[in-house]
Structure formats: C-alpha cells, structure tokens
Amino acid sequence: MQVEECDLINNLYPSKDEATLILSWANEQNPGPWINHCKFSAIAAETIALKCGMDVEKSYVFGLLHDIGYFAYRDFKGDTCHIYSGYTLMMDKGYNEVARICLTHSFPYKDFRAYLGTDMTCSDNEKDFVSTFLSEIEYDDYDRLVQLCDCLSTTQGICIVEKRLISAVMKGTYNEFIYKNWCSFLELKEYFDKKCNMNINNLFYDDICKDIFS
C-alpha cells in the first residue's frame, strides 16, 4: 500500500498502521538509522503515555512521525530542514496535528535560534514561518511528550536524557542557546516524572542498563 492510498481525509493524524506505512515509504526515499530513532521515540512515547493517562496510539504515531521530514534527504542534503519538509508533507496529507509535531519537537525552548539540527537549510521565509508558528501556539502535553522522547531515543535504543544532550554537543550541534535547551529538556523530564508519579527512567530500566553497561 502506497502512502498516497491511505485514507488521509477524516483524521488529523493517521492510525498506527497508516503511520507505519508512511514511515516505510519514507525509508524507501531515504534509508538510514533515523528510521530506528523514530521507532524508539514512538515506543518511548507510547510507554509514557500509558503510564500518565494520555492517548497511547496518538502518542505512538506522533513519536513515529516526528522526524518524517528526513524523507526528503539524500546524502545528508535537502532543499530545506527536516522540520519544515515534515510539516509540509503532513499538511499536504491532511494530518495537521502531525505537521504541528514536526515543527514543535525540535523546540523545547521556543526560539528558532535555539535549533540544534544539523540540517540548517531553511530559507529566511521558512525560518520566519516557524518562528511565527511557535509564537502563536501553546504547547500541549503531546508537544512536550515528543520533545522529551526525541531526546530519550537514539538510533540504537532508549537512553537517559543527559546522554543525548551531551552526544548532540559532541557531534558539533552547539550554539549560544545550549544552556536554555538543556534546562528545557530537563524540565520536560521532571514534568513527566510528576505526571507518571515516578522517575520515568524506571519505565526503560532494562534499555537504559543495556545502553550504559553493554
């Protein structure tokens, strides 16, 4: 089943099965480890959502498709940054809520200048659009959840937030907003700890132990 054959009319986000088809299609366009990162983000979102009473399937779908914009890349090159290409793809398909997640997941701190992606190819008009979009919305718990799960997930599995933050800097994604970004991610972790009435690292205890000790 091709992506364009999915029923894209009645919902603002796809079913879990449809989202899986979309990600498979994206993998055909641009194969790479980013696909595994999306899958682990979805598992993390689903797990936390179940614990704190959020919509489990919606959370899974948002986690699975948050980086869908990487479909447009070849050899790490694209016409625009993945947040914007993901947004336009999902809007074209009628999945407005996923389109929103494609933009918000990269901005726990609401400032485009704080963007830590390595694909800084957005035009000035696109940057202005994203900045205006972020300024005009209030984050909900699904925005926050995917922001957190993006930071909990690598291409190999689920890890602690601090590892991902340090790893991003080691890869060279650093700017003057790094401190504010780090504070925002740690605040997200604390926020969901409270919603779940536990340290959420315990939800992924085996995965984290494997990541640290293996």
Image (spheres, rainbow, N blue to C red):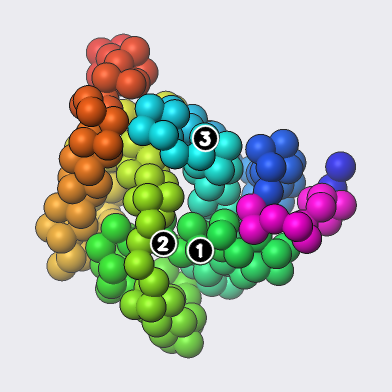
Q: Is residue 29 visible?
A: yes
Pick the residue in front: 42 or 213.
Answer: 42
**Residue 212 falls in which quadrant of the image?**
top left
Disc 2 marks which amino acid?
Thr
Ranked by sequence position, the earlier of labels 3 and 1 is 3
Residue neighbourhood size for the residue with mark 2, other residues' Cα within 10 Å, grouped as few (<14), some (14–19), many (≥20): many
Which of the two marks, 3 or 2, is nearer to us in this view?
Answer: 3
Look at the numbered discs 3 and 2 and tell me whether their residues touch, using CB distance below 8 Å. no
Residue kind at label 1, given as amino acid type: Arg
Tell me where residue 139 sits by quadrant. Answer: bottom left
Q: Which is more N-terminal, label 2 or label 3?
A: 3
* Residue receiving disc 1: 100
Q: Quadrant of the N terminus?
A: top right
| 86 displayed left or right of 105 | right
- What's under tag 3, amino acid-wise? Val
Q: Secondary structure at mark 1?
A: helix
Q: Is residue 7 magenta?
A: yes
Mark 3 → mark 1, Cα distance in angstroms: 18 Å
Question: What is the magenta range?
Answer: 3-13
Q: Position of residue 114 (x, y in %)?
A: 26, 67
Q: Residue at x 22, y 25 (%)?
A: 198
Element under label 3? helix
Q: Which residue is mark 2?
A: 104
Task: Verify CB contact (< 8 Å) between mark 2 and mark 1.
Answer: yes
The percent position of residue 5, horizontal first and vertical second, equals 87, 52
Q: Which residue is mark 3?
A: 56
Closest to the observer: 178 or 98? 98
Q: Which mark is residue 13?
A: none
